[in-house]
Image: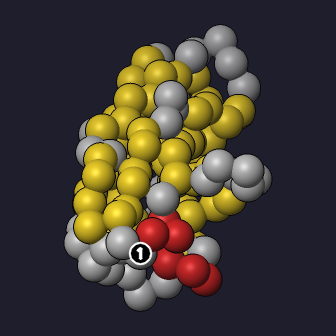
Amino acid sequence: QVQLVESGGGLVQAGGSLRLSCAASGTIFSINAMGWYRQAPGKERELVAAITSGGSTNYADSVKGRFTISRDNAKNTVSLQMNSLIPEDTAVYYCYCNARAAGWGWRNYWGQGTQVTVSS
């Protein structure tokens, strides 16, 4: 299967920046989309940003112009640069990927989540 390990969360003041990183490991044959979701207390999990293996990106309207997603296909990593953070960005951020691993068909995998807290 595929394991995703996230890093880079933390506490930051409004207007600050954070960078999240996620590395996929395991017997991976291929990864299609990679990206980030987030879930704030009392709210549903929502897509923040995604990137395909070809580099096409998709962002939630609420983060456009502030967040940038990038990917290294050779290393199976995805990063999220978050600038101009606002308190509404406070959430647990989850890395995900759609991948095919040895003995498995295409499926979605999730990281354990990393907390991002933006203070006002």
Q: Quadrant of residue 26?
A: top left
Which residue, given by chain and number where applicable, does mark 1 sit on? 86
Q: Quadrant of residue 46?
A: bottom right
Q: Quadrant of residue 109?
A: top right
Q: Residue at x 39, y 24 (%)?
A: 25
**Left or right: residue 67 compared with residue 89:** left
Q: Residue at x 39, y 54 (%)?
A: 117
Q: Residue at x 37, y 36 (%)?
A: 6
* Residue 91 percent location from the top left of the image: 52, 53
**What residue occupies the far front of the structure in this picture?**
120
**Left or right: residue 90 compared with residue 19:** right
Question: Which is nearer the eye, 111 or 115?
Answer: 115
Q: Residue at x 73, y 50 (%)?
A: 42
Report the quarter where the C terminus lies.
bottom left
Q: Amino acid at mark 1?
A: Ile
- Number of on-image labels: 1
Q: Is residue 72 visible?
A: no
Q: Is residue 45 visible?
A: yes
Instruction: Provide the secondary structure element on which disc 1 rests.
Output: loop
Report the quarter where the N terminus lies.
top right
* Residue 98 percent location from the top left of the image: 62, 41
Please tell me how crowded label 1 is: few (under 14), some (14-19), or many (20+) other residues with Cα within 10 Å. Answer: some
